[in-house]
Amino acid sequence: MGFREILESREEETEAVKRRDLEKKSRERGIREKGDVSVEGEIAAERDFFWRLEDLKLVRVRDDRAFFRLDTNLDAVIAPLGKFGNHEEAAIVRNISAGGASIGTQYECCQKERLLLKVGLLSECPEWNLFCRVLRVEKKGISGFVYGCQFIELGDAEREELMQAILELQRRMRGMKV
């Protein structure tokens, strides 16, 4: 087989792949820092073995979390750190882990801002004072904001104690369900 025949054969194969792949929907998974995303779209073969992705839609974003996360609805208070004045704002802890929490509040703050979170996990234990950094900000219309926060300045022993309190809270919450 000569050079010209090889090229013609390759072009025919490429055209067949293009036709087949244009009709094919595909789900692809991409990796991002500390988690993954799933996207859906059309894949089409291009020349020289390149692939074109079209009409991409975000299907799912999942964070890679190191700790068990418990969905809650706990009353809390947040206080911004590093600002003049000493004011506290009401908040709700939507979920919590030994690594961070999701906090809902009317108070507006920015990504990377530092907060003090005061929350009581168990009635017989003292309130937790947790320093955190805002990693994610979501505007929730008239209901305010939801912040994804990472706990900072938390030693290993404190983190273990917090994890035990979260697991005990989970056991108690399960016992209350009917």
Image (cartoon, grey):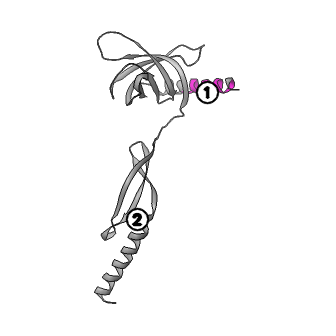
Q: Name the amino acid, label 2.
A: Leu
Q: What numbered label is drawn on residue 170?
A: 1
> What is the quadrant of residue 148 in the picture?
top left
Residue 170 on the magenta span: yes
In the rendered image, which residue does mark 2 sit on? 22
The amino acid sitting under disc 1 is: Gln
Position of residue 49 measured from the top left corner of the image (x, y, whole percent)? 34, 69
Label 1 environment density (alpha carbons within 10 Å; few <14, some 14–19, many ≥20):
some
- The picture places residue 89, in percent across and down from the top left corner, at 41, 14
Q: Secondary structure at mark 2?
A: helix
Does residue 152 appear in the picture of this structure?
Answer: no
Residue nearest the viewer, comparing 169 with 107: 107
The answer for how far apart the CA atoms under marks 1 and 2 are is 49 Å
Q: Is residue 76 above or below residue 35?
A: above
> x, y percentage for residue 58?
42, 47
User: What is the magenta segment's predominant secondary structure?
Assistant: helix
On the rendered structure, is 150 left or right of 161? Answer: left
